């Protein structure tokens, strides 16, 4: 192609079109990324924005080429007009300013733009990589699954639009770049094909996430900035290599921001040509001219058809692994169930073998296909999710999960008013619990008939949750919070298994699964009412403490009285029997016998009762002997009186007088003493000296 100003004007127009298209794709990606909080899309838009200066620099350079060609035509026209004395008739370029500016652009402008773009790729890539790590550590999926599907659908559509438009325009520009005068357009094609690749990555990640795996979408926020940093390193590598690359006259030098890596994607035919040249160089001859190559070329259609037929025939053999059980479907209809081993079937798509997939669901609802198997225990969370931080203490007053699932239960027995029937309206209670359902597959056909994996889990979860709601609605809050959780779990497991076996499934019933475990863990009331339950617990503990104190006092008192609690109970029983015999009007012998039995028990007791009985017996004996002594003395006095009445009276008189004057002062005087005078010192004989004498105090007490 002739290097005239028209060719360069076309290239300038294509560069402007590429700049507009690059900016439009960047705007589309940044709007989608901001609305959906897609970190990879925002990073891809940053890369696309950095591609705009590439197109702008190419447009400026190609426009300068156009100006240089116009200037050259003008100079050539002036030279053809003759005039040896013309000022333009010189061999130098001092009167070619456009050519000088063009040379300066290739020497200074494009290298400066390359360095700036290289730094931008490295800086923005590092910034977005750091941001991606923080984003992945805190990112959450939408709470509503339908919102997630809408977001992924938009990501798939925008990614496909970006990739298709970018690849088509890149192939178009790469085709133009095959012309020597447009060779620098390869840099623009590489820039827009990079945007197309990132859009394709977003589309593939969204499609994979819709299919069940978010691994690609989680990797894209890291892959895209790393790719930008790699391109930045490549720019500086090209910048350094340009210093050592030999210049050829008439050959337009390639700018450093022309990515050779992305250039292969924009022009894949260059890859095939490079491989062909490498093979020819290694073998030392042109392979495409050999007879074998020509033979293969003539028979390539038949070989491809034969390979396709063999490949299709191989689909008639299916291998089922030891941990799998599959079902053979003929145009979607069930035919038979197959076990481990290899089996013959009609080729695809007539028949196919389907093995249920095993998927894991994380806390955010993302599904990851682990494999195809019918073994293993599958888990469905029917209640609240387990706590995120396993090291944090789990208390009723703490936050347990991001979203609590409450069960309606009956109030406690003490909360129901007297005479209130079950049908009457009354308050209910709420509790939250972790209820994991662990189930295994027993019948592959019935299990597969339920639907695909998400549908099957949704059906099983709905049936199980219905049983859970019905079960808990018949339990009171005391039984749920303080009862036997193992018993509740076993009862709930039986109900869920019965419900699974009763699911309508085509012409038969059953889901083909069996619940092997249902847990009832972490049962707690709402966090706002947890302190009220603590008050109840405190009151119950105080009540138990008072009961224990009463039991302690009972044991202490009974032990002090009769020696032991068991003996006290026995004595009380015998006393009740004695009261019953007395009230019934039994004969005296039976009453005496029962009294003797009670007395014997009291005497054998080692407590205060036995001591009291012994003391009473001693007092009785003392009183009896004292009175008996008095009676005997009285008999003796009667006999003495009868023997000598006068002597008895004198002796009694003297004894009485002695008793009367025992503590009196007696003065004996003589009647013959004339003028008797007595000086009395009227003082009490007891001067307090004998206050602490036991005999004296005893005598005072007797008086």
Image (tube, rainbow, N blue to C red):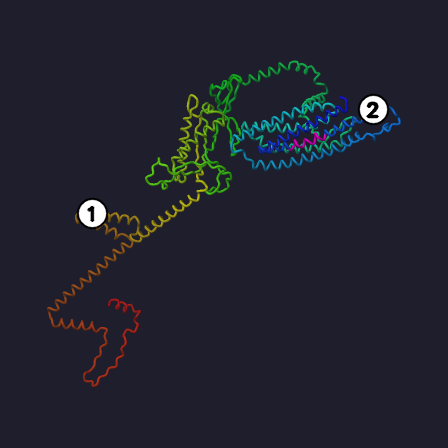
Where residue 647 appears, x then y in whole percent? 13, 72
Residue 636 is covered by the magenta coloring: no
- Examine the rendered structure and indicate whether residue 173 appears above or below residue 524: above
Residue depicted at 12% across the width and 69% down the height? 641
- What kind of secondary structure does the magenta stretch mostly adopt? helix
Secondary structure of residue under mark 1 = helix
Q: Position of residue 372 (x, y in %)?
A: 51, 26
Residue 81's disc number:
none
Quadrant holding the N terminus? top right
Residue identified by numbered label 1: 581
What residue is at 47 percent from the left and 31 percent from the top?
380
Q: Is residue 485 left or right of residue 321?
A: left
Q: Dot 1 surroundings within 10 Å: few (below 14), some, or many (20 or more)?
A: some
**Of discs 1 and 2, which sits in the foreground?**
2
Q: Is residue 49 magenta?
A: yes
In front here: 121 or 638?
121
427 relative position to 594: left or right: right
Query: To which quarter of the image does residue 483 belong?
Result: top left
Counting other residues with Cα less than 10 Å from the Cα at mark 2, is it few (<14), some (14-19), or many (20 or more)? few
Using residue 624 as the reference point, say whether residue 404 is left or right of it. Answer: right
Quarter the C terminus occupies: bottom left
**Real-space CA distance between mark 1 and mark 2, rounded to the nearest whole angstrom:** 153 Å
Nearest the viewer among 644 and 598 is 598
Residue at 25% from the left image edge and 47% from the top image edge = 573
Q: Secondary structure at mark 2?
A: helix
Quarter-of-image position of residue 172: top right
Percent coordinates x, y for residue 308 in the rendering:
59, 17
Of all residues, the one furthest to the right in this rendering is: 85
Q: Which residues are magenta?
A: 46-57
Mark 1 and mark 2 in contact? Answer it, CB < 8 Å: no
Q: Which residue is mark 2?
A: 77
């Amino acid at each position: 192609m002739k290097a005239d100003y028209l060719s360069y004007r076309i290239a300038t127009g294509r560069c402007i079109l590429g700049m507009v298209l690059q900016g439009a794709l960047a705007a589309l990606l940044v709007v989608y990324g901001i609305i959906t909080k897609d970190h990879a899309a925002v990073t891809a838009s940053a890369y696309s924005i950095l591609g705009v200066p590439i197109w702008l620099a190419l447009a400026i350079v190609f426009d300068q080429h156009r100006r240089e060609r116009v200037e050259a035509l003008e100079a050539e026209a002036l030279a053809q007009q003759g005039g040896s004395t013309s000022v333009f008739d010189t061999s130098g370029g001092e009167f070619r300013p456009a050519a000088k500016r063009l040379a300066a652009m290739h020497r200074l402008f494009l290298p400066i733009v390359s360095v700036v773009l290289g730094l931008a790729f490295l800086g923005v890539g590092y910034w977005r990589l750091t941001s991606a790590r923080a984003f992945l550590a805190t990112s959450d999926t939408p709470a509503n699954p339908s919102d997630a599907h809408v977001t992924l659908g938009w990501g798939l559509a925008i990614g496909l639009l970006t990739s298709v438009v970018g690849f088509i325009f890149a192939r178009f520009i790469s085709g133009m770049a095959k012309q020597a005068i447009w060779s620098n357009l390869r840099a623009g094609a590489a820039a827009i094909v990079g945007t197309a690749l990132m859009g394709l990555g977003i589309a593939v990640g969204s499609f994979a996430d819709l299919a069940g795996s978010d691994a690609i979408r989680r990797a894209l926020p890291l892959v895209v900035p790393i790719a930008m940093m790699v391109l930045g390193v490549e720019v500086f590598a090209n910048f350094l290599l340009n210093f050592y690359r030999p210049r050829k006259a008439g050959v337009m030098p390639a700018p450093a921001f022309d990515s050779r890596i992305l250039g292969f994607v924009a022009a894949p035919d260059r890859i095939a040509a490079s491989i062909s040249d490498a093979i020819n160089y290694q073998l030392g001859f042109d392979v495409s001219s050999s007879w074998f190559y020509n033979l293969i070329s003539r028979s390539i259609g038949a070989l491809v058809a034969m390979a396709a037929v063999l490949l299709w025939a191989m689909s008639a053999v299916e291998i089922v692994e030891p941990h799998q059980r599959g079902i053979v479907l003929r145009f979607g209809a069930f035919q038979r169930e197959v076990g481990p081993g290899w089996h013959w079937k009609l080729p695809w798509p007539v028949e196919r073998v389907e093995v249920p997939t095993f998927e894991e669901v994380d806390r955010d609802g993302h599904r990851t296909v682990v494999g195809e198997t019918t073994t293993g225990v599958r888990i469905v969370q029917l209640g609240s999710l387990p706590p995120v931080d396993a090291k944090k203490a789990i208390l009723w007053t703490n936050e347990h999960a991001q979203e609590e699932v409450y069960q309606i239960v009956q109030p406690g027995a003490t909360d129901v008013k007297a005479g209130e029937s079950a049908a009457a309206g009354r308050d209910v209670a709420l509790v939250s619990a972790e209820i994991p359902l662990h189930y295994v597959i027993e019948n592959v056909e019935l299990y597969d008939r339920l639907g695909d994996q998400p549908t099957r889990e949704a059906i099983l979860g709905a049936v199980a949750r219905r049983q859970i709601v019905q079960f808990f609605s018949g339990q009171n809050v005391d039984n749920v919070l303080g009862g036997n959780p193992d018993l509740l779990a076993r009862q709930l497991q039986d109900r869920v298994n019965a419900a699974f076996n009763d699911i309508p499934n085509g012409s038969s019933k059953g889901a083909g699964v069996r619940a092997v475990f249902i847990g009832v863990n972490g049962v707690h009331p709402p966090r706002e009412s947890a302190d009220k339950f603590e008050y109840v617990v405190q009151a119950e503990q105080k009540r138990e403490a008072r009961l224990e104190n009463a039991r302690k006092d009972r044991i202490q008192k009974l032990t002090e009285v009769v020696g032991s609690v068991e003996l006290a109970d026995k004595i009380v029983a015998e006393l009740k029997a004695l009261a019953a015999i007395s009230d019934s009007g039994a004969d005296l012998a039976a009453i005496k016998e029962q009294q003797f039995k009670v007395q014997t028990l009291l005497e054998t007791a080692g407590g205060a009762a036995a001591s009291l009985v012994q003391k009473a017996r001693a007092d009785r004996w003392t009183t009896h002997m004292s009175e008996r002594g008095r009676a005997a003395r009285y008999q003796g006095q009667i006999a003495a009186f009868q023997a000598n009445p006068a002597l008895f009276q004198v002796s009694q008189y003297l004894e009485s007088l002695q008793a009367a004057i025992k503590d009196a002062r007696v003065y004996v005087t003589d009647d013959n003493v004339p003028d008797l005078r007595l000086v009395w010192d009227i003082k009490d004989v007891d001067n307090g000296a004998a206050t602490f004498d036991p005999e004296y105090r005893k005598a005072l007490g007797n008086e």
